Amino acid sequence: MNYFFVILRDFEKKLLYMLTILVAGAGKSSTCLIQYLLYHVAKHKWNLIVADGDLQAIEDKINGNKFAQAAPLDITNTQERQKLVKQADLVVSLMPPHLHILLAKDCLQFKKNLITSSYISPEMRELDGAVKDAGLMFMCEMGLDPGIDHMTANQIIHSIQRVASSIISFKSYCGGLIAPESDDNPWHYKFSWNPRNIILAGKDGAHYLNNGKEVNIPYAELFANNKKIKVDGYGSYAYYANRDSLKYLDIYEVPEVKTFLRATLRHPDFCKGWDALIKLGLTEQEDNNREHKTLAAWLKDKTHYNNGVSLPEHTANVLSINKDEQVISMLKWLGLFEDEIIMNPDRSSADILLDLLLDKWQMKEEDKDLVIMQHEVEYLHRDTKISLTSTMIVEGEDSKYSAMAKTVGLPMGVLAKMVLANRVTLPVGVHIPNMTSIYRPVLNELKHHGISFEETVA
């Protein structure tokens, strides 16, 4: 009889303790992640805490769900941040990349597993040994790109290697774009994710492998003369090399590969326009423009305007193009030739440009975005060269339930659910999702949410 009551008491204690997920960040990319987790915390009787500096953003997303709590948070406030981490069984971070490390150190201190969507920073990498010693999993790069790209790339690579084939070329492209029905500006682009990341894209240049030779491209040349790929049903997109592709060579385990490239997709006109912004000095981060009161004055100073021709014609001369070319129309559409007042000009050109684009590239409520990912792989099987193309296309529902929010958030949400439900063996240490034990179950579930790939083989 006593034994029965002990069992009953322990069972009641378990009912009182609810497993808790802490999501840090309630911005654009969190919508589908939080919606997914709300369904599963209700189903499993778990608890969800959503922390962000914007209380309204949190409340809009949790919508009064009784299994969710809003936690207004200044992420740099150590006491408040650690209080939330202590309550959690798992932390999911959608904070800006440089802030992940704050949560990572807390997770290490309080023995919590961590999932993020960002690239592994050097500071995060340094924690690998300590994370392993603690028996924890810090899964980084668990979003779209990086994230779904790693999982699907390794799924393809491992399946090819199982039939004793040698991969000689691997190219992976991904783009967060605007759907054709919402494409209504000459840049063919709108913000569907963190706008600052667009401004900073490519700043460190690119490094990749082409026909056995290492290629380095500086930022100043990255958007010039871009090559194109075709996507069935959507036409041609330009691409530019993305960061340092070669750091993934060992992780992907493709020793025979001669070409290895990870790249970002954009509309061809976007690349031409962004190349112009770079050449005009409007993306610089280290300058200061305190003397410039208008957009036209800013552009004049950056391009050393001192002659009698019109500003559009002068700009065309600086770019060594004809004044009637599309790029000049694109710059005009941004308002760069107008005497529009710059609010708070005492900043870098990159900051002024970001403010300008936030207005011009804002998605309307009904706008739909588009995410395209495509892998192109060539491999030798019994001395025959085979080409495989694997393509994912996801369109958003509107600006809130965007394709970007879906493809960034759901991989993290699926893994978070599997961790709390003990449905996955956790790799200890700081990782990306390139192991079969992670990518196989995650990709299988993502198919049920419309995130899947079509393959063609030639």
Image (spheres, helix red, strand yellow):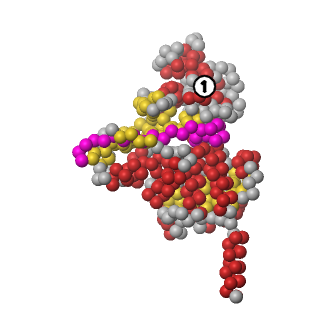
Q: Nearer the viewer, residue 284 or 400?
A: 400
Q: Position of residue 233 (x, y in %)?
A: 48, 31
Residue segment shown in magenta: 382-404
Residue hosting label 1: 184
The quarter of the image holding the N terminus is: bottom right
Q: Position of residue 43 (x, y in %)?
A: 66, 59
From the viewer's perspective, tell me whether residue 361 is left or right of residue 206.
Answer: right
Q: Residue at coordinates 73% horizontally, 46% vertically from top-left? A: 60
The disc labelled 1 sits on which kind of residue?
Asp
Q: Is residue 316 left or right of residue 294?
A: left
Q: In the displayed structure, would residue 259 be above or below residue 78?
A: above
Determine the image quadrant of residue 222. top left
With respect to residue 338, does 384 lie above or below? below
Outermost residue toward the top in this view: 308
**Please, which residue is most extreme toward the bottom here?**
1
Q: Is residue 351 visible?
A: no
- The residue tagged with tag 1: helix, strand or loop? loop
Q: Is residue 366 magenta?
A: no
Residue visible at 56% across and 65% down?
422
Across and down, in percent, residue 250 comes to 38, 53
In the image, is 113 to the left or to the right of 5?
Answer: left
Quadrant where the C terminus is found in the figure? top left
- Residue drawn at (56%, 47%), measured in percent from left and top? 449
Residue 387 sits inside the magenta stretch: yes
Mark 1: few, some, or many residues within 10 Å (few <14, many ≥20)? few
Query: Going 40% across and 54% down the picture, which residue do you hit?
Result: 251
Give the image location of residue 352, x and y in percent.
64, 32
| Along the viewing direction, whichever of 90 and 84 lies nearer the viewer | 90
